């Protein structure tokens, strides 16, 4: 795990802390779960490709490319 600092509005912090207390969970656990849910909804194929690529040069080419084709479409067009 990694430690991060986040800045929350006072009201949001107070509400989350209260929920954490009532649910007997840590505030960190609540934030982790919320972020996991947000990522599950908001990660699109281009972001998924960026997350899976490890070579910096390939990443830069993906980022500067205006056109993006999902891997399944590319495989289909190449007969793979």
Image (cartoon, helix red, strand yellow):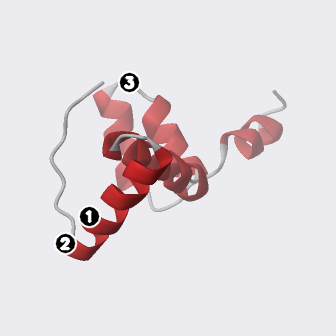
Residue 33 coordinates in the image, percent (x, y): 48, 45
Closest to the observer, 8 or 68: 8
Query: What is the total number of numbered labels drawn onto the structure image?
Result: 3
Residue located farthest toward the front when viewing the structure as drawn: 22
Residue 11 sits in which quadrant? bottom left
Identify the residue at horizontal 42%, vertical 47% (top origin): 30
Identify the residue at horizontal 51%, vertical 50% (top origin): 39
Q: Which residue is mark 2?
A: 10
CB contact under 8 Å: marks 2 and 1: yes
Closest to the observer, 5 or 60: 5
Left or right: where 44 falls relative to 18: right
Residue 78 coordinates in the image, percent (x, y): 77, 34
Crowding at dot 2, Cα within 10 Å, few <14 / some 14-19 / many 20+, comes out as few
Lower sequence index among marks 1 and 3? 1
Distance (Cα) linking label 2 and label 3: 38 Å
Q: Which residue is mark 3?
A: 54
Asked if residue 21 can be seen in this view, the reply is yes
Left or right: where 49 falls relative to 6: right
CB contact under 8 Å: marks 2 and 3: no
Residue 12 sits in which quadrant? bottom left
Identify the residue at horizontal 52%, vertical 39% (top origin): 49
CB contact under 8 Å: marks 1 and 3: no
């Amino acid at each position: 795990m990694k430690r991060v600092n986040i800045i929350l509005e006072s009201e949001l912090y107070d509400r989350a802390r209260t929920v954490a207390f009532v649910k007997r969970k840590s505030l960190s656990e609540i934030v982790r779960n919320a972020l996991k849910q947000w990522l599950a909804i908001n990660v699109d194929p281009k972001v998924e490709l960026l997350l899976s690529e490890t070579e910096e040069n390939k990443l830069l080419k993906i980022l500067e490319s205006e056109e993006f084709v999902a891997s399944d479409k590319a495989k289909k067009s190449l007969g793979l």
